[in-house]
Image (cartoon, rainbow, N blue to C red):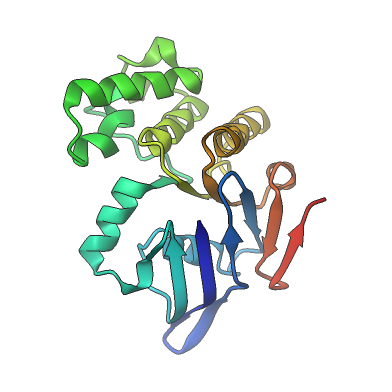
Amino acid sequence: MIDTTSVTAEVGGVRILDSPDLGVVPGQVVAVVGPSGSGKSTLLRILTGVQVPTSGSVTIDGVELTRLSVGARAAFRRDRLGVVFQDPELLDELSVAENAALPIVLAGRPRREALALAREQLARVGLASLVDGSPQTLSRGEAMRVAVARALVAGPRAVIADEPTASLDRTNALTIARLLVDNARAAGAATVIASHDPEVVALCDDVIDLRSEARVTRS
């Protein structure tokens, strides 16, 4: 489902990423770890098609992202990936449900249908009572749950999460991580989570350590 081969990234002739190959199957959760500057965020930007690697290839759900144009990568990211960042990036002018529905509205889904799907997903992340409220009234943990609902609303076959728990307290961090892991199991979504949190990493099936370029498969 998610496959990378010989992916590297350079800036100004300086190598900032030399990634071990990834192979993530449906329902599997892989953690990407490493110290600041090891290339975690760079790798995830490449996996989402935001950045093109200097060398190597990235294939997700049978599509080689590195062969697509900028516009085609953006459409692929919108339509076929679930993406969660450290910052929930909610729009204050939209309701909670409208924020969660945004990807499928932009993809052309009728608004009423999109909002119904968003409300279902928000209920799954424990926010059924807040769907019509404003993002401005949410706690940080609640806002991140909206971001997770938004990432999952289209039922993506692959989910990429870049440090989604970094700014959360312990309880909320584990809640967000478990939501992503549970979705991977239930929906068969190949999932990659970049994290420095050992408790989050412990929930994952495999670990890619960019510092040692090693992969550890949990028994």
Q: Residue furthest top?
A: 129
Estimate the x, y position of residue 24 in percent, counting from the top left.
58, 57
Q: Residue at x 30, y 48 (%)?
A: 78
Quarter of image, res 185: top right
Q: Residue furthest bottom?
A: 13
Q: Specify whether 7 is left or right of 81.
A: right
Total numbered circles: 0
Q: Residue at x 42, y 76 (%)?
A: 53
Q: Is residue 110 visible?
A: yes
Q: Residue at x 69, y 46 (%)?
A: 204
Q: Specify whether 188 is left or right of 128.
A: right
Q: Is residue 163 visible?
A: no
Q: Residue furthest front?
A: 62
Quarter of image, res 37: bottom right
Q: Specify whether 116 is left or right of 206.
A: left
Q: Specify whether 57 is left or right of 70.
A: right
Estimate the x, y position of residue 152 in percent, counting from the top left.
42, 36
For residue 141, above or below residue 30:
above
For residue 5, above or below residue 179:
below
Q: Residue at x 33, y 53 (%)?
A: 77
Estimate the x, y position of residue 56 in percent, counting from the top left.
47, 79
